[in-house]
Image (cartoon, helix red, strand yellow):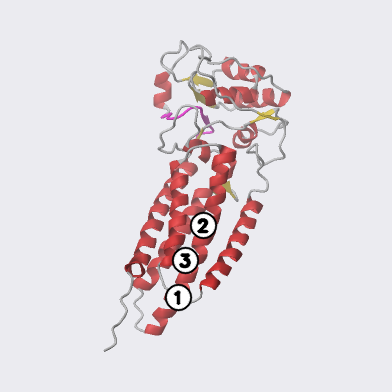
Amino acid sequence: MIRRRSTPWIHKWSRPLIAAIAGLGALITGYLTVEKLTGGSAACVAQAGVKGCNDVLSSPWATVLGQPLALFGFLAYTSMVIFALAPLVSKSGENNTNKQLENRTWWLLLVGAIAMSVFSGYLMYLLAFQIKALCPYCIGSALFSLSLLVLTIVGREWEDLGQIFFTAIIVGMVTLIGTLGLYSGVNQSGVTTPGQGEKISFLPSPNDIPNPEFGWKITTTSGQAEIELARHLVKIGAKEYVAYWCPHCHEQKLLFGQEAYQIIENNNIKIECAGDSPKGKPDLCRAANIESFPTWIINGQSYSGVQNLAELAKISGYTGSTTFKYFK
């Protein structure tokens, strides 16, 4: 009597597991898409001196082809859910048709998982070395992509492992080249125009205590472009919500320089949210639903995190000189 070989449990449950993980990824990226489109603030616990999720959402790498990057992630995860469940919900009565659908969707899952893993790997590089932020959503999405790739490979019995390796090389190279092409216009300054000026960063020492009245002293000077942008922001009624003890708020000041930021302060664009500051107006901050600092509200839209001046110019409709002296 010939004993039939039992099917490994991972082969039985691989598709439901893939669908479940991709579904979680779709929920995360869908949430981030809504926050990006509505100008909201992602629920993310930020640590002192460390950039968080909202800094990532406000970075130029968070937008691709004019749309939120998270939207493309949502579409990718949703596609993986469809590919995983299609053979399971197919009502076709022909075994050959179901078999073809299963084989084709496995290859689509493999190609999708490879592309998502390579792209997520590049995003992790940006997160660590360019944006320099801690974003649990981003890290979770990268782990989901890697998990999908592992499950796709071990979730069935592949006849030709060499073909998987060859597919991984081709898809990985195409994805990486395409990714570099998409971000070719974004330099280390985080600006989608040719890079200019000096890169700045501010992290106070333990003994460098901020003054409740003004925070830390601004040590940079303004150029004409910074002054013109500050005047434009005053003209359109922009608001910047800050806390004197916030290092990122001081970085925003350094980007403007002394003269330009004086214009912002003198015209009540800046709103201090710290209750222990002599200039504090925490009630106004609560009324505006401010959850992180700095937060800009421009033309009714909210933008969290330090904004490079070129980005402020873009979102505020500023059309003057953009030869800014500093970038983040």
Q: Which residues are magenta?
A: 289-301
| 32 left or right of 322 in image | left
Reading the image, the residue beneath label 3 is 109
Q: Quadrant of residue 223?
A: top right
Residue appearing at x 42%, y 46% in the figure: 31
In the image, residue 85 lies at what x, y percent? Answer: 37, 67
Per the picture, the main secondary structure of the magenta-coloured stretch is loop
In the image, residue 80 lies at what x, y percent? Answer: 44, 62
Where's the C terminus, which quadrant? top right
Compute the Cα span from label 3 to label 1: 10 Å
Q: Which of pointers 3 and 1 lies earlier in the amino acid sequence?
A: 1
Where's the N terminus, which quadrant? bottom left
Q: Which of pointers 1 and 2 lies earlier in the amino acid sequence?
A: 1
In the image, residue 157 lies at what x, y percent? Answer: 42, 73
Crowding at mark 2 (Cα within 10 Å: few <14, some 14-19, many 20+): many
Residue furthest toward the bottom? 1
Residue type (three-letter) at the residue carrying disc 2: Met
Reading the image, the residue beneath label 2 is 116
Image: 265 above or below 133: above
| 16 left or right of 296 in image | left
Residue 103: numbered disc? 1
